[in-house]
Image (cartoon, rainbow, N blue to C red):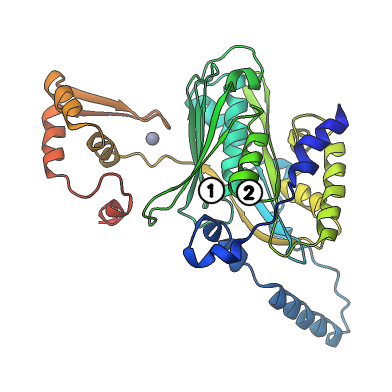
Amino acid sequence: MMSLMICSRTVTGFLARQTQHSSCRPKRCLHYYNSQWIQRRPSQKSIIATRAAEQEEEEEDSGSTTETEDPFSEYRNKNNINDQVVSGISGQGGIKVTVCTIRNMINDLMIQHTMTEVPIQAMGRTLTCSLLIANGMQKEQTVQITLNSNGPLRGLVAIASGGGKCRGFVGSPMLGDMSIFEAVGKGVLQVVKNHPEWPRPYNGITAIQHGDIDRDVGIYLAESEQRSCALAAATAVKGILCVAAGGYLIEQLPGVTDEEVAQIEKNLAKLVEMDGGDQLPTNLLLSGTTPVDIMEIILDGLDAQPLQQLTPNLECDCTEDRLLRAIRLLPASEVDDLLEKEEQLEARCEFCGKVYRMESWEVKEKLEQADGDPSLDSEFEDKGKK
Ligand SMILES: [Zn+2]
């Protein structure tokens, strides 16, 4: 059973597909956007040059033999007190690792939506995946994962931005005792990537094969985006409290060597053994192993270098203007009908639960004055700033 776990969840997560970003870069396709962080990090040559310069300095400064400094000193998060996303890269630049802990956020979501254990499991895993995939993207770029499935959960949406802004909701927040597979059921997993300045979002879809979410997202990454990666996301709930939530994403970058891949597989097997459970990596998180610790285990022997850390937070961007835009996207006859019948319109934001109430005459007036394409964020960005 244990070896099966290692096999399915982690090591063979490296489906042997090589990314071919360079060929599609001029077209600014999805892979181009996905690979932006590769350009943002210092190139291998400059890393080596900087290190050589540092070494020279050290040698010149022979009087003080400096201890090797901890490159992750600012990234430590004792006992996982804070929610955190941390990313790092192997010294040779072939492997990127992103790890997160989001226990506080999941507890807040649990209260916000009065969710029971199974929906919170599903939400914790999906939001972790969104957050891990969004890491390294531009601050405003979003990754939305939607489960459109026939299980009693009745679907789920989780959105995270490159800057760590998160939100989400499930179709049925109150579910009794059942497995996550049963709750999710059969259907499709959809991934939508968007940016306020893009003319249209990028869309990917894959059939739900496992129902445990992280493996399905991993399949999506391998099949739809040709990304060779290993992904794990899990949530541990005790009673009405989420005690651990988080996961990791390990990606092979262009130019990765066989040695790097072999070392990662060895390290991953060790990580699975250290966690010892089937909800990887919640046992590690519970025992106080932080995202940086987990990254160091995964990149052990590969000269881990920090890339970024951020604090994710729950944040909804619903406003009355957005609600009006949503109304404008409905068929006009339907809206007219509604405005005639009702004196007051009431709408509730599915993400944060905020209720908006507007008089029908007020809505009518605002709709008459409205301009800009309601489906395009870009046409409304400037107005919001004024
Ligand atoms: Zn909202």
Residue 65 image position (x, y, % from top left) = 89, 77
- The disc at residue 233 is none
- Secondary structure under the numbered disc 1 in the rendered image: loop
Q: Taking the image as drawn, is residue 77 in sight?
A: no
Residue 235 image position (x, y, % from top left) = 67, 30
Q: Are dots 2 and 1 in contact, CB under 8 Å?
A: yes
Q: Amino acid at mark 2?
A: Val
Query: Quadrant location of residue 39?
Result: bottom right
Residue 143 image position (x, y, % from top left) = 51, 45
Which sits in the foreground, 105 or 172? Answer: 172
Residue at the disc numbered 1? 164
Query: Quadrant location of residue 365?
Result: top left
Using the image, determine if residue 323 lies above or below residue 303: above
Q: Is residue 385 left or right of residue 86?
A: left
User: Ligand 1 is located in which of the four quadrants?
Assistant: top left
- The disc at residue 85 is 2
Residue 280 image position (x, y, % from top left) = 75, 35
The residue sitting at 85% across, 74% down in the picture is 66
**View extreme (bottom): residue:** 60
**Figure label count:** 2
Query: Quadrant location of residue 232?
Result: top right
The residue sitting at 66% across, 35% down in the picture is 214
The residue sitting at 55% across, 18% down in the picture is 151
Q: Is residue 216 left or right of residue 355?
A: right
Disc with the residue nearer the chain's start (2 vs 1):
2
